Image (cartoon, rainbow, N blue to C red):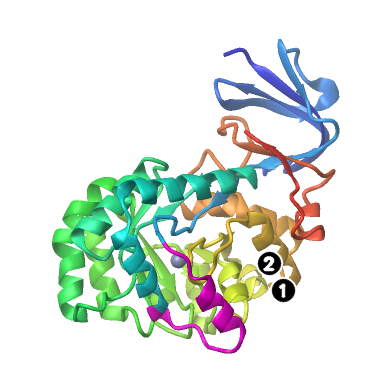
Amino acid sequence: MTPMLVTNIGELVTWDDEQPILDDAAFVVDGGRIAWFGRRTEAPDADAVRDVGGAAVIPGFVDSHTHLVFAGDRSAEFEARMTGQPYAAGGIRTTVAATRAATDEQLAANVARHLSEMRAQGTTTVEIKSGYGLTVHDEARSLAIAREFTEQTTFLGAHVVPAESEIADYVELVTGEMLERCAPYARWIDVFCEDGAFGADESRAVLEAGIAAGLLPRIHANQLGPGPGVQLAAELGAPADHCTYLSDADVSAIADSGIVAGLLPGVEFSTRQPYPDARRLLDAGAAVALATDCNPGSSFTSSMAFCIAVAVRDMGMSPREALWSATAGGAASLRLDDVGHLRVGAKADFTVLNAPSYVHLAYRPGVPLVAATS
Ligand SMILES: [Zn+2]
């Protein structure tokens, strides 16, 4: 493939140490990677040239937390909640029933539809969890389907205890036969550590079994109230997602251990819970990722721009911090070093905005600002 020069960029976000954001910029793509970036006037010649007309260009969004393998619709539950009923974690079981009843083709078509919706909104890397099957067969097929679309697949058999099981028996299944069948399709293992789901001992058992099977741990932690999830994450070096209810000790544990705190504001928006305090984490020196948590129950948005807008408006982040968290922060959460930035050597995953600056992502909430995703 001939090298391509992308030029006339009004504002280019690279996250390079020396030049993280450049005005009047250009970059060269060669072999699917960034080969050069810098001032437009200093750009090398190239046979293929793409002029973006002064638009801003940012790294493609990295959505480090989604639950895209599902069937069914929970809009009635959302409507009920918006008229005064509280969210309960057991609502997951509604989606489990619909997912078990769906064919592989229906589930795959649903994943494809949501991924194309995400791509149209600037997202180029997506993590996908299982967790709506909760049987050996249904978890394994959920992950096999997810693996057709991304390498960033996560085994979340420990999402909720299925209605037909006792917790001790179910943990034994998740850490035994289910793990064995799912591990070949997964890079990560996850657990919903929360009252009403899995406690500290069960969560530790699930993650340690996954680690022993060669998977990397991550945790749904401290979403609905204070709990042991964040401390367990820090101990295991696992990214901790949600982080809505944190003690001072939790904040210190995240910062000191260097784990990434994943904040998922679509959940708090859709459940009318208080938003996580990103400012408190950033001021403590913690790395923060923003992700959609796209799922039919608690956060049915696929828009990273929406998450950025909420993070800036209500979570104490600057527009620049929020963009970093939605790109480089997501990559850090997924332990990927060649996405989420546009430094030399990065994958050429970039998004051209219909705007002169990335600030418009928060400044113009709800407006479709993505002109093109590569
Ligand atoms: Zn989740």
Label 1 within 8 A of ligand 1 by Cβ: no
Quarter in which the C terminus is drawn:
top right
Q: CA distance from mark 1 to mark 2?
A: 6 Å
Q: Residue at x 20, y 72 (%)?
A: 171
- Quadrant of the image where one finds ligand 1: bottom left
Magenta-highlighted residues:
72-90
- Classify residue 201 by image quadrant: bottom left
Residue 260 seen in this snapshot: yes
Q: Which mark is residue 311?
A: 2
Q: Position of residue 151 (x, y in %)?
A: 39, 43
Contact, mark 1 vs mark 2 (Cβ under 8 Å): yes
Looking at this view, is 86 or 321 the one in front?
86
The kind of residue tagged 2 is: Ala
Q: Which residue is mark 1?
A: 314
Q: Residue at x 35, y 74 (%)?
A: 93
Query: Is residue 156 positioned above or below 40 on the image?
Result: below
Q: Position of residue 37 (x, y in %)?
A: 71, 28
Looking at this view, is 274 or 83 the one in front?
83
Residue 273 seen in this snapshot: no
Secondary element under disc 1, as helix, strand or loop, is helix
Quarter in which the N terminus is drawn:
top right
Dot 2: few (<14), some (14–19), or many (≥20) neighbours within 10 Å?
many
Q: Which mark is residue 343?
A: none
The kind of residue tagged 1 is: Asp
Looking at this view, is 65 or 257 the one in front?
65
Relative side of 310 to 250, left or right: right
Secondary element under disc 2, as helix, strand or loop, is helix
